[in-house]
Each structure stands twice: as structure tokens, then as C-alpha cells.
Amino acid sequence: MSKTEKVVITGASRGLGALTAKEIAREGAHVFVIGLASEVDELKQVASDCGDPHAWAVCDVRDEVAVHVAMDSAAEHLGHIDVVIANAGVASQAVISGSDYVSKLKLTMDVNFWGAVYTARAAWPHLAKSSGYILFMSSLAGLVNPPMLSTYNASKAAIRAFAETYRLEGKAFGIDVGIGTFSELNTDMTNRGFATKAGEHLLSIKVKVGGKVYTRRVLPVAEVEPAIKAIVRAINHRYRHIHWPRRVFLMRMAPWFIQRVVEQFIKPRMHRAHSLALVEDGPLTTELPPTP
């Protein structure tokens, strides 16, 4: 990575955003991190770890004005912006018939979709000036849609559609676009938001070996380091698409087929999982302040 590359990352106080920021900084880039006020200590630490203790800004991506202010602050601090990673995101288990479903859907769309839209719009003039690159963090869930995650599924599918359109419009102004498609990674989001009793019931199978019964996940959680390396490569080469783990590439090629497989696998487990989810407190992967 060029030592003059100037990179802005949202949702960078912890998890994938923080790890990516540190790796990009190790590669030689100048990094500016953006995160929530409730995580400001972690955000400052990430900025320091990236080599510039002043390269940070507090911003809730649900607030369009705040996003523009943070992006302009980043541009002023860095001199210009070459790369933006729209990483901020949230997830929680939600069943469609649940009493809190609509509020969870609105919140998830506000952070994951509208937050990415506000970030991309705020970044546009800066990226057009530098012929830059923006990476949208989508998910396999935006292509293959598991149950009890429809709020997250919808937000990631919407991001993908928006990103592809942004690519068409931005290309004429020198802006390149990448879309990250990841499955469950070993981060706070997976460990906190997806590790529920209902989710484990859906994704686990029992295997009998030598008289003993073992419980195994159908899709194991993937290590995060290769995903971060993929993000670095995407920035270096302005990739249109990146993915991890490797199985995601095959799933991305034929999502209609994988969706059918998921349907058949889930069907006998759904009633029990639904009952568990209705009484289970599915926490948000990130505690959020009141809506701005």
C-alpha cells in the first residue's frame, strides 16, 4: 500500500473496523477512524495504535449532518481522502412475528443502510477529487437470507444494490467501488449478536462418534485475519468484490441454489428455533445511543 494513501473507516472503535484500521496503518497508510461517542476511549486507542492519536472523530452514522462533518474533518486532517470504508454496522436476532420486530428493522436499516448512504454521499466530493475508492461492507446475508436475521439481511441486500448503482454513477467521476461479502467472522458482531440459543439450534447438528454425541455447527465461524488481508488487497488493487471465507465465492455465484438448500435444512428446525427466539433477548451487537 502506498505510504501516501489516506483512508477513512467508520465503525472503527472495535471489531473488524479496528482490526482493519490497524492493519492498513501497518501497511503504511494514514488512517482516520470514526466511531460512537460511547466508545470514544477505544476509538482514541485505535487512532494511537494507527500512529496518529489525533486522527479520529465521534460520529453516529445515523446522523447525516454529523457524517458530513466527520468526513470533512477527516479530509482536513489528512489533506485529502483516497479511500473510504463504510464499515459501521449492527445486527440482532429478530423474528418477523415478534413484538419488537419493526423497531429492530428500522434501527438496523438506519445504521447499516442509511449510515452507508450518508457515508458514501459525504465521501463523494473527496473521492471524486482524488479518483478514490470506497468499500461497502455487505454480507453473504445480503444474498442468502437466513431466518431470524431478516433485518440484517434486508440492510445488507440494500447496501449491495446501492453500492452497485454508486459504482455506475461514480465511475464517470473517477470513483471506484468495492463490495465486501463475508460470512460469519470471529468478531464482536458474530460472538455477541449471532450466538443465541435459537441460532445455535438452527445451525448445529448432532454427530454420533464411537457412542458419543457431538454438536457441531454446519458453518463454522471463520477467522477474521484473512478477511482483513482481503480488505487490504482490495484497497491496493481497487477490487470490485472481495469475500471470505472461500466458500462465500461459490455461494455468491449461485445464491438461489444455496437459498433452496438453506430452506430444506432449516424447515424441520424452524418451529423450535422460533419458540426460543420469541422468549430470548437477542442483544444488539453494538449498544447504540438514542436516535439522533
Image (tube, grey):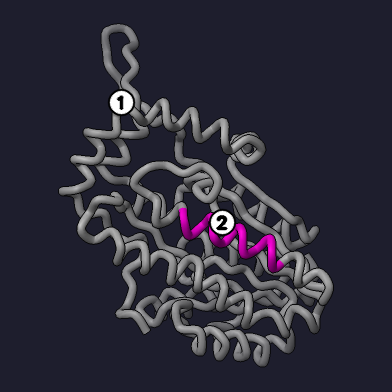
Snapshot quadrant of residue 118 = bottom right
**Residue to which mark 2 is pinned:** 138
Q: Is residue 68 magenta?
A: no
Q: Residue furthest top?
A: 210
Placement of 144 over or under 155, stated as above or below: above
What amino acid is labelled 1 in the image? Pro
Residue 95 in percent (x, y) is at 29, 49
Q: Residue furthest left?
A: 279
> What residue lies at 48% left-to-right and 60% top-to-bottom?
155
Mark 2 neighbour density, 10 Å: few (under 14) some (14–19) many (20 or more): many
Mark 1 neighbour density, 10 Å: few (under 14) some (14–19) many (20 or more): few
What amino acid is labelled 2 in the image? Ser
Give the magenta-colored segment's residue range. 154-166
Assign the N terminus to one quadrant of the image: bottom right
Q: Is residue 155 magenta?
A: yes
* Horizontal side, residue 45 vs residue 22: left or right: left
* Horizontal side, residue 217 vs residue 269: left or right: right
Residue 70 in percent (x, y) is at 55, 86
Q: Is residue 180 visible?
A: yes
Q: Is residue 3 visible?
A: no
Disc 1 versus disc 2: distance between alpha carbons? Answer: 29 Å
280 or 220: nearer the viewer: 280
Assign the C terminus to one quadrant of the image: bottom left
> What residue lies at 45% left-to-right and 35% top-to-bottom?
220
174 or 186: nearer the viewer: 174
Snapshot quadrant of residue 108 = bottom left
287 or 240: nearer the viewer: 240
Secondary structure mostly taken by the magenta-highlighted segment of the chain? helix
> What residue lies at 72% left-to-right and 85% top-to-bottom?
125
**Residue to which mark 1 is pinned:** 268
Q: Secondary structure at mark 1?
A: helix
